[in-house]
Amino acid sequence: MTAKKKTTVIAAGCLIFFLAASTIMVRSVDRLRPTVSGQDVLYFESPKAIKRASLGYTGLMACIYWTRVVQYFGSHHHSSATHYNLLAPLLTITTYLDPHLVIAYEFGANFLAPAPPNGAGEPDKAIQLINYGIQHNRDNWHLYYDLGFVYYMDVKDYAKAAQVFVEGSRLPHTHPYLKLLAAQMAEHAGEYQTARMLWSATYENTEDQQIRKNATDHLRAIRVDEDVRQLQMAVTRFGEQTGRLPSSMHELASFMELRALPVDPDGIPYKLDPDGRVLVAHPDDFPFITRGLPPGYKPPVPGSVH
């Protein structure tokens, strides 16, 4: 047997030995867990120590720990657990061992962010996890999507979600949908100037007529929301100065020193109800508006006749 073959046989034997040892260790831990007062225990907490113990097989060890993450989350979720104490530490170990294991960031964030029993209720740790992933996988737009999703769904920070989607939309080979999401988040956050810029860029940089119509509808909605917000602020100022509500849109326009009644993008004047609410005359013509809707208004079902 040549020296090269001997080395190969020895290396293969060592690999089999360490795999068997890892399996025995995991099974031993599983047998011990029921005796620890029902509490979660992480027997090896240091990612650096585990990396050293892997003897260079960090990718293999990362896969083993990722398997433990999935098993841990699955068992706790199945039992409707309210605590996932080991989830973040296990994910930290997994991604330290293999910073390029993208699946651990994508699914790990979905495990961490939602409130129990659907997740650990730790969106801050989910954000920390994905940011670590972005540091080591800077051209992966999926991670920006996942990060923006956490900010949107779990933190309710729409401005930050918009910022993340914008950053992701600038990556090479990114999905164009990120720019649409960025615009929607900016609009949701009330950042009208940013939303207008993003929707205008979307309109100008596509030939898809459906996307163009969607951008146009959002631009119209932004103008309406801005108009109504400014008019509603004028109603408040009028009440502070006079002690009453304006009697009509004519009186409000005069108070604002406008030369004509304020109108929507279709040229229809805005209305003022007896309670001082500024309303859009035909809200069905402006999908995506969030202001100026009559109390109890329900948008029409797509495809219905109205």
Image (spheres, helix red, strand yellow):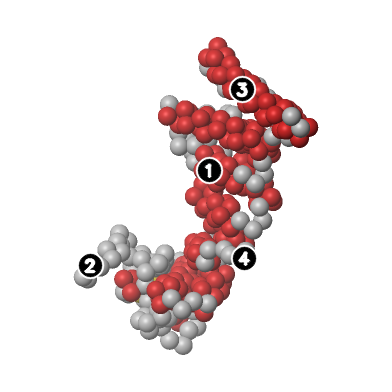
Instruction: Out of 223 and 294, give the one closest to the viewer.
Output: 223
| Depth check, front residue: 190 or 300 | 300
Do we see residue 109 in this rendering?
A: no
- The numbered dot on residue 172 is 4
Residue visible at 61% across and 41% down in the picture: 125
Closer to us: 236 or 283: 283
Q: Secondary structure at mark 1?
A: helix
- Ranked by sequence position, the earlier of labels 4 and 3 is 3
Asked if residue 125 shows in the view, the reply is yes
Q: Secondary structure at mark 2?
A: loop
Which quadrant of the view contains residue 66? top right
At 66% from the left and 52% from the top, the residue drawn is 137
Residue 216 % position (x, y):
43, 76
Residue 9 location in percent, x, y? 70, 29
* Residue type at numbered disc 3: Ala
Going by the numbered disc 2, the residue's amino acid type is Ser
Q: CA distance from mark 2 to mark 1?
A: 38 Å
Q: Where does label 2 land, which residue?
A: 304
> Quadrant of the image for the C terminus?
bottom left
First of labels 2, 1 by sequence position: 1
Alpha carbon of mark 1 to alpha carbon of mark 3: how far? 28 Å
Residue indicated by mark 1 = 107
Q: Residue furthest top?
A: 35
Task: Give the Cα distance between marks 4 and 3.
Answer: 43 Å
Relative placement, left or right, of 16 versus 269 is: right
Label 3, on which residue?
A: 20
Mark 1 or 4, nearer chain start: 1
The quadrant in which residue 144 appears is: bottom right
Q: Please tell me how crowded label 3 is: few (under 14), some (14-19), or many (20+) other residues with Cα within 10 Å.
A: few
Q: Is residue 134 above or below residue 38?
A: below
The residue under the point 52% across, 34% down is 70
Image location of residue 305, percent across then percent down: 21, 70
